[in-house]
C-alpha cells in the first residue's frame, strides 16, 4: 500500500500514550468538549502493579474534575507514617510515628494508594461519558512537524503529521493511518518514542541504588503493617506502602551482590525473583515475621535514575509530559502525581488556544511551569533517596543516617511531596503585584481550601468544590462587609466598573462572559444580616453564587476565611483563580485595571 | 383458564407496592440475599412530585445501605429555616432564621429534598445490582392466609396464597399467577388493598385543613426562597420547600371558599388549578413578588387526615407498612421517612427468621415498635398542623398563633421530626438493665455517630460507617484503657469468656460467628501507645476492626467518644447494636451473662 492511499484524518489534539499523564489530558479535554484522540500501544489496560500513590494535591485535582469521590472510595488512605531503626537488641524497633502528610492546608490530609489500573479506570469511565475512548493497540511510526513559521503560529492549522500503525491489523487491511493534528502530546513513558523522534535529551544520571518491589497480602505480626513505614535495618532499607484491601507494597533495598552479574557489572534480573525479594525483606523485618498470604500480585526491580528532559515541547505544537519528561525514584510517591499534574496544567491551555480565547503564546507557560517543577522534584528526590538508601547511623557507623535527620527531611519535604507547595513562578498568567491584598492566597499556588456558606441557604461548601476544572477563570469577588452601607456602595461601583465595555468581561467574554468567567462573590457580613439579593446582579448570576464567610447553622464548619486568605474583612479584594485551580492574580477593588491588564496579556479580544 | 392451570410459584417474601416503603424492604432483602419479589401496579416509576423530604435519620439509614452518598449528591440540602409573619406595614416580613434541624447529634444536620422518582431510582439501581427488579404492572386480586396454627408458626411454610394479575397481558396468555409466599408485605399506599383485604381499619380523623401543593422554578425577589420557610400571612399560611436544582415546592393553605362546593360541602378539585394556587401564593408573599419561571412541574390538593392502622400485621405472616399504616400531613416531611423506616425495621427481622437464626416471634417486635412510633407521629402532626394552619396572632386576633409559640414547637419537635429521637420501648430486642454503663448510648435509640480512628492506620471513621445494615448484630467491645496492664488482662479474660461454648458467639453463631455477629473493639488508649495487635484475636478478626478513641494524625477529628457515649474510659463496656443501627443492649464486662441472655431471648441455638 502506498503512503498516498493510507487513511488520512484530522484532529485537534492527538495524545500518544494512555498512562496517567495521557489519560488526565484526554479526560480534561473530553470534558471541555475538545476534539481529541488518544492511542496506546498496549492491547488492554493494566490490571496490577505500577505506580500507586496519589498525593493530597492530586486528590484535590481529581475532585475538581468530579472524579475524586470515586478515588477516595476505592483507594486505601495513608494517614500515619512509622519509622523503624536498628534495635540495640538486634533486629529493628519502632523509633517514631508521625502524620503521613505534613502540609497543614491539605484538604485531604492523607495519601491514597490504589493500583494504576484502577486509577486509569476512573479516567476511562469519565472520558467514556464524554464520548472518548482509548484506541489500541496502536503505535506511532513517524512524526513530522511543519517548518512553516506561519503554520506553526496559526492555532487553526494542523502542522503535525503523525503516522499511526494498528498493531492488530495487517497493513493491507488499512493497518495504518496518517493523522494531521493541531497539537500532539507524547505521554508515552520513560522510553518515550515522541521524545526521541523530537531529539529531546534527558539531563541527569543514574544512581547505584537498586531496589526491588513486591505487592502481596502479608501474614505478619508487624504492628505497623498498615502504615507507611520507613525502615532502616542493618540488612538494608525497606519501605512499606499499604494498599487497597489487604494488599501491601514493599520496597526492598538490594545490594549489588544480590542482582549484579560480577562478570559484566550489570543488573541481572534473572538473579532475583519475588521469593528472593521476600527473603531479603524477612531479614530486614527481624524480629517481626512477614510472609505472603497467597500469591505475589506484582513485582519488579529498578535502579534509581534522576533525569529531566531539556525541553518539554517543540514550537508549542508537540509536547511531552509525565515519565517522558522526568524520571526519579518511586518511593516518595511522586511519579504518577507529577505526570498527571503536567497535563492538568496543559489541558486548559490547549482548550483556550483551540477555542480562540487565548493567544497561542499561552502554551509557553506549560514548559515554564512544569520543567521548573520537575527540576525541583529531581533535587528533592536526590536528597530523599540518599537519606533513604543510606546506612542507618549506629555507634559503629557514625556517618550513617540518623532518625532525626531522616524525620526532619521527611517533614521539610512534606509540603513539596504532598503537591501542596507547588508554586508557579511569575509569568503572564501569574502576576503578584498586589499580593498584599490577599496575603495568604499566594499567586502561583493552588487556591487554599476553606469552607464558606451559601448565603441563600446556609449550606456549607469547600470553596474548591466551586472552582471546578471546567476551563473557566474564576473571578472571586471578596466583597468585604456588605452589611456596611459604604462598602455596599463600593461593591456596587465595582460591579458597574467591571461591566463596562472596556472591562475584561466584555473584552474577553466572547459575548457571553459566563462561558469564560465564573463569578462568585464572598461577603464577610454575618449570615443573619445578609440576603443573597443584597449583592449586585453581576455578582450573583445564580442564587448559589453568593457565599458568606460565616459558620454553618450548626456551628460545625466555616468562618474565618478572610483571615485564612489574608484579606481585609472590610475592604475585600478581587481574586482570579486559573482554570487549573492556581491563583492567577489578586487585586484591590481600586486596581481593577490591573485585572483587565492581566487578562489582556494572554487573552484575545 | 381454570385456577388449577394458572401459573404457580413460591417465594420467601412477596412485596406488594414499589413506593419508598416497598423499595426499602426489597433492597434490604436483596442485599441480604433473601428470595424476594416486588410487584407494583404502576407501569413505570414516577418522574415528578409526590413526597420529597428526607430527614437526617433517614440519611443515616441510606448511608448504612451504601446508598447515602448518591442521595446526598443528587438532593438539595436544607440547612436554614426562615419564619415570616404579618408586617405592621402590610404584607409579610421576616421574623427569624433558625437551623432547619434541631437534633444536635444528627450526623447530617440538614434535610434533603429530592423528588420521589429520584429516590426510588436509588433503590432500583441498588436492587438491580443484587438481581431484583420491580415486576409491573401487576395487581394482587386475592390473598388467603392459612388457618393452620402449625403452618403459621413454621418459618419454612408458605402460608400466604396471593393471586397476581398482569395488567399488560390478557388472562388467556398467562396473565395471572398464584404465588405462595412465606411472608407478604403490603406497601401499597394510603388506599392499601392489602390492608382492606386483611380487614384492618384505620383509627383517626380528617381535619378541615385544605392545602394545595405546587412544584415549580420561581422567579422572585424573595430573599429566603432557598430556605425552608414557614409563612403566616393574613391571606393564609404557606410553606416553601426548596428542591433539587432550582425547583421549589409551595404548600399553600386554602380556604373553604376556594375549593369547597357550597351545594355539596365537598372539595371540588375542578375549582382549583396550579394557576389559581399561584394566585393565592402571590397574595401571601406580598410585598415580595413570586412568579413561576417555565412550567408547573407538579401540583396537587389534599386535606389533612391523621390515622393509624389498628394493627400492622396478621399472624406475623402478612404485614403492612408505610402509608398503608399511617396517614398525616406532608408538611413536616415525615411521610416518606416513616414509611422507609417501617421496612428498615422489618427487613432484618424477616432475614433472621428466614435463615433460621431467630425465632419467628421476633417479628412481633415490628408492630410493637413501629405502631407506637406511628401514634407518636400522629400526635406530633396534630399539634404541628394546628399551629401551622392556624391564624397568626395579631393585635386584632389574640387567640392566633404567635411566632414564639410556633418556633418553640418547631424546635421542641425537632428531635422527633428529624427521626433522631425515635426510641423503641423495652422488648426482647431492647433491654436496658445495664444502661448506666453506657449512659448516653440509649437502648432503643440509634447508635450515636462519632468519629474514631482505626488503630492500625489512624484513619478516621464515623462509627456508623462500621455499622452497616448487613443483617449482622454488631458487638462493640469498648475495651477501656488497654495500655493499662490490669485492664488488658480484663479484656483478655473477657475474650476467653466470650469464646466459650456456652457463650452467644458459639450458641447462636451458626458455626461461623462472623456471619451473624460483627465484632469491633474500641480502646481508650492513646494512639502512640497502641498497636492493633495488642487486642486479643477474637476482638480483631481483621486489622480494620480495632478502633481508638483518639484524634486523627492531624488533630482535625475524633476523640472524646467514651465521654459522648457515657462509658468509663478505664473499665469499658459491651454494646450490642442491632442490624438496623439501634442499640439493643449494653452491659459491663462482668455481666456478659446478660448479653448471652439477651440473644437467647429471640435467637435459635
Image: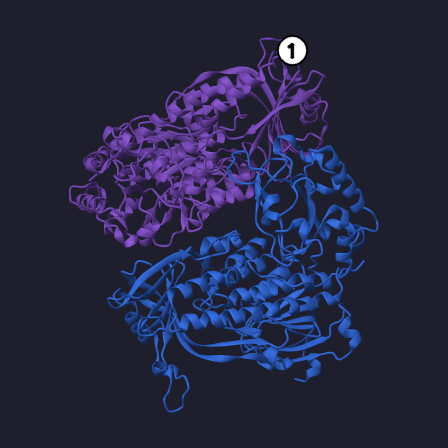
Chain colours: A purple, B blue
> In screen coordinates, is A561 left or right of B522?
left
- Percent coordinates x, y for residue B603 in the rendering: 76, 60
Which quarter of the figure has residue B252?
bottom left
Q: The disc numbered 1 marks a residue on which chain?
A: A
Residue sitting farthest toward the bottom: B263
Dot 1 surroundings within 10 Å: few (below 14), some, or many (20 or more)? few
> In screen coordinates, is A435 left or right of A110?
left
- Seen in the picture, residue A583 relative to B310 is either above or below; the reply is above
Q: Quadrant of the N terminus of chain B?
A: bottom right
Q: How many marks?
A: 1
- Percent coordinates x, y for residue A235 in the rendering: 67, 17
Residue sitting farthest toward the left: A501
The residue nearer to you, when weighing A5 against A181, is: A181
Res B456 visible: yes
Which quarter of the figure has residue A86?
top right
Residue under pointer 1: A262
What residue appears at the point 75 percent right and 74 percent down from the top-left corner? B152
- Seen in the picture, residue A430 relative to A514 is either above or below; the reply is above
- Percent coordinates x, y for residue B260 in the rendering: 38, 84
The residue nearer to you, when weighing A303 against A383, is: A383
Local SS, label 1: loop
> In screen coordinates, is B131 left or right of A64?
right
The residue nearer to you, when weighing B173 against B405, is: B405
- Percent coordinates x, y for residue B129 in the rendering: 59, 56
Which quarter of the figure has residue B601?
bottom right
Res A139 visible: no
Q: Quadrant of the C terminus of chain B?
A: bottom right
Amino acid at each position: 500500500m502506498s503512503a498516498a492511499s493510507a487513511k488520512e484524518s484530522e484532529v485537534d489534539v492527538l495524545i500518544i500514550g494512555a498512562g496517567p499523564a495521557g489519560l488526565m489530558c484526554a479526560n480534561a479535554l473530553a470534558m471541555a468538549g475538545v476534539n481529541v484522540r488518544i492511542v496506546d500501544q498496549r492491547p488492554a489496560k493494566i490490571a496490577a502493579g505500577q505506580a500507586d500513590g496519589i498525593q493530597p494535591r492530586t486528590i484535590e485535582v481529581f475532585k475538581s474534575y468530579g472524579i475524586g469521590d470515586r478515588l477516595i472510595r476505592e483507594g486505601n488512605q495513608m494517614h500515619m507514617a512509622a519509622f523503624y531503626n536498628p534495635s540495640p537488641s538486634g533486629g529493628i524497633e519502632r523509633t517514631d510515628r508521625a502524620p503521613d502528610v505534613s502540609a497543614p492546608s491539605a484538604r485531604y490530609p492523607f495519601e491514597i494508594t490504589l493500583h494504576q489500573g484502577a486509577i486509569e479506570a476512573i479516567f476511562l469511565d469519565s472520558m467514556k461519558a464524554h464520548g472518548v475512548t482509548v484506541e489500541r493497540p496502536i503505535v506511532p511510526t513517524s512524526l513530522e512537524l511543519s517548518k512553516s513559521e506561519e503554520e506553526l503560529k496559526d492555532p487553526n492549522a494542523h502542522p503535525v503529521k503523525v503516522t499511526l500503525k494498528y498493531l492488530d491489523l495487517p497493513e493491507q487491511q488499512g493497518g495504518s493511518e496518517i493523522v494531521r493534528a493541531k497539537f500532539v502530546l507524547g505521554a508515552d513513558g520513560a522510553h518515550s518514542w515522541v521524545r526521541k523522534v523530537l531529539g529531546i535529551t534527558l539531563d541527569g544520571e543514574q544512581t547505584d541504588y537498586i531496589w526491588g518491589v513486591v505487592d502481596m497480602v502479608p501474614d505478619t505480626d508487624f504492628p505497623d503493617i498498615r502504615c507507611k513505614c520507613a525502615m532502616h535495618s542493618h540488612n538494608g532499607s525497606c519501605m512499606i506502602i499499604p494498599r487497597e484491601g489487604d494488599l501491601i507494597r514493599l520496597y526492598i533495598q538490594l545490594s549489588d551482590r544480590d542482582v549484579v552479574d560480577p562478570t559484566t557489572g550489570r543488573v541481572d534480573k534473572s538473579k532475583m525473583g519475588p521469593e528472593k525479594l521476600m527473603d531479603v525483606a524477612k531479614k530486614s523485618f527481624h524480629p517481626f515475621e512477614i510472609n505472603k498470604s497467597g500469591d505475589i500480585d506484582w513485582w519488579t526491580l529498578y535502579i534509581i535514575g534522576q533525569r529531566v528532559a531539556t525541553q518539554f515541547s517543540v514550537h508549542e505544537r508537540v509536547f511531552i509530559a509525565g515519565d517522558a519528561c522526568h524520571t526519579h525514584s518511586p518511593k516518595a510517591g511522586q511519579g504518577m502525581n507529577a505526570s498527571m499534574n503536567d497535563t492538568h496544567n496543559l489541558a486548559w491551555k490547549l482548550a483556550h488556544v483551540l477555542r480562540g480565547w487565548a493567544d497561542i503564546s499561552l502554551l509557553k507557560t506549560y514548559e515554564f511551569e512544569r520543567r521548573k517543577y520537575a527540576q525541583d522534584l529531581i533535587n528533592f528526590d536526590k536528597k530523599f533517596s540518599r537519606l533513604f538508601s543510606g546506612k542507618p547511623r549506629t555507634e559503629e557507623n557514625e556517618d550513617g543516617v540518623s532518625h532525626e535527620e531522616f524525620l526532619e527531611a521527611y517533614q521539610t519535604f512534606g509540603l513539596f511531596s504532598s503537591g501542596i507547595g507547588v508554586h508557579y513562578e511569575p509569568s503572564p498568567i501569574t502576576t503578584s503585584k498586589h499580593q498584599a491584598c490577599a496575603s495568604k492566597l499566594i499567586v502561583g499556588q493552588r487556591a487554599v481550601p476553606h469552607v464558606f456558606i451559601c448565603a441563600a441557604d446556609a449550606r456549607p461548601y469547600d470553596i474548591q468544590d466551586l472552582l471546578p476544572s471546567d476551563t473557566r477563570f474564576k473571578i472571586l469577588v471578596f466583597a468585604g462587609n456588605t452589611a456596611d452601607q459604604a462598602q455596599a456602595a463600593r461593591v456596587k461601583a465595582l460591579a458597574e466598573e467591571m461591566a463596562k465595555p472596556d472591562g475584561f468581561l466584555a473584552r474577553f467574554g466572547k459575548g457571553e462572559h459566563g462561558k469564560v468567567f465564573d463569578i462568585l462573590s464572598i461577603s464577610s457580613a454575618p449570615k443573619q444580616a445578609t440576603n443573597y439579593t443584597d449583592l449586585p446582579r453581576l455578582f450573583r448570576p445564580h442564587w448559589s453564587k453568593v457565599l458568606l464567610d460565616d459558620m454553618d447553622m450548626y456551628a460545625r464548619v466555616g468562618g474565618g476565611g478572610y483571615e485564612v486568605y489574608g484579606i481585609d474583612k472590610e475592604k475585600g479584594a478581587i481574586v482570579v483563580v486559573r482554570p487549573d485551580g492556581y491563583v492567577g492574580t489578586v487585586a484591590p477593588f481600586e486596581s481593577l485595571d490591573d485585572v483587565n491588564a492581566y487578562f489582556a496579556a494572554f487573552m484575545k479580544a
